[in-house]
Image (spheres, helix red, strand yellow):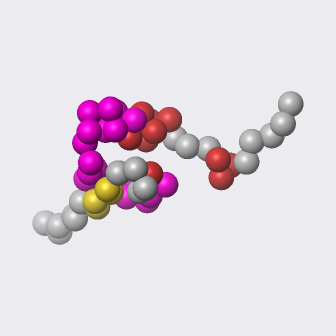
Amino acid sequence: MGTVSASFLIPIHDANIVATMLTYHIPALLTHNPTDFARFSSLITVLPLATTAP
């Protein structure tokens, strides 16, 4: 059996979110974790949520 490189691992939750977005024609995602979705930037628009100090 072969080995799997860590560079090919995709968090399944992130992939499920993107798959749902594509199914329902949702073009953009607002997230506090834009780096988690950077690999999907050819499929969706990833917009970082700005945080404000109290």
In magenta stretch: residue 45? no
Q: Is residue 12 left or right of residue 32?
A: right
- Quarter of the image for residue 35 reads bottom left
Q: Is residue 9 left or right of residue 40?
A: right
Residue at 45%, 39% (x, y): give it. 15
Q: Quadrant of the N terminus?
A: top right
Q: Position of residue 52 (x, y in %)?
A: 17, 67
- Quarter of the image for residue 23 reads top left
Q: Is residue 4 left or right of residue 31?
A: right
Q: Given the current orientation, which residue lies at the most extreme left position?
A: 54
Q: Given the current orientation, which residue lies at the most extreme bottom position?
A: 53
Does residue 26 sit above or below 28 in this rendering? above
Q: State how many labels appear.
A: 0
Q: Which segment did they paint magenta?
A: 19-39
Residue 17: tell me if it is visible: no
Residue at 49%, 54% (x, y): give it. 39
In magenta stretch: residue 36? yes
Residue at 50%, 35% (x, y): give it. 12
Q: Position of residue 17 (x, y in %)?
A: 37, 37
